[in-house]
Image (spheres, rainbow, N blue to C red):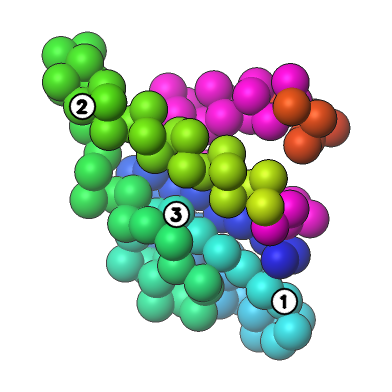
Amino acid sequence: MDLLVIAGEASGDEHAGCLVRNLKNRHPDLTVAALGGKNLKESGTHFLFDFVDHAVVGFFEVLKNYGFFRRLFSCTMEWISEFRPKSILLIDYPGFNLRLAEALCKKGLSRKGGG
């Protein structure tokens, strides 16, 4: 896998879908997996999960859905560990993506760690 794209909000999904379509036009052999929304799904990615439909805003909404996000985080880490994408593009959704970047760094799966 060349690239994993994670976009947790509708606006990020829209930009990410456009980016992936342009990248795939220039590099037809590029393999891209994604957690995002309909734009990433329609851009020709190996679509893993509709993240945008599960986006939450606010402290209480996050708490109410904590178990779900914890499981999703764990599954995402497992997928990355197994498939080892060459690059990971984290778009918006800092509550999830910055924690993911930090965890990837701690596990030695990322050199940078985002932020």
Compared with 33, 78 (above or below) is above
Q: Residue furthest right?
A: 111
Could you tell which of marks 3 and 1 lies nearer the N-terminus? 1
Between 111 and 72, the residue placed more toward the observer is 72
Disc 3 to disc 1: CB gap under 8 Å: no
Say which residue appears at 45% left-offset and 67% top-offset.
47
Specify the quadrant that holds the N terminus. Answer: bottom right
- Please give the range of residues in magenta: 83-106
Magenta stretch contains residue 88? yes
**Is residue 47 found left or right of 80 in the rendered image?**
left
The answer to which quarter of the image holds residue 96 is: top left
Say which residue appears at 34% left-offset and 44% top-offset.
9
**Is residue 40 found left or right of 69 in the rendered image?**
right
Question: Helix or strand or loop: what does disc 3 sit on?
Answer: strand
Where does the image place residue 20, in percent across and percent down from the top left? Answer: 58, 69
The amino acid pointed to by label 2 is: Asn
Label 2, residues with CA under 10 Å away: few <14, some 14-19, many ≥20: few
State the residue position of label 1.
Answer: 30
The amino acid pointed to by label 1 is: Leu
**Front position among marks 2 and 3:** 2
State the residue position of label 2.
Answer: 65
Query: What mark, if any, has residue 35 been given in the picture?
Result: 3
Magenta stretch contains residue 99? yes
Asked whether residue 93 is in view, the answer is no
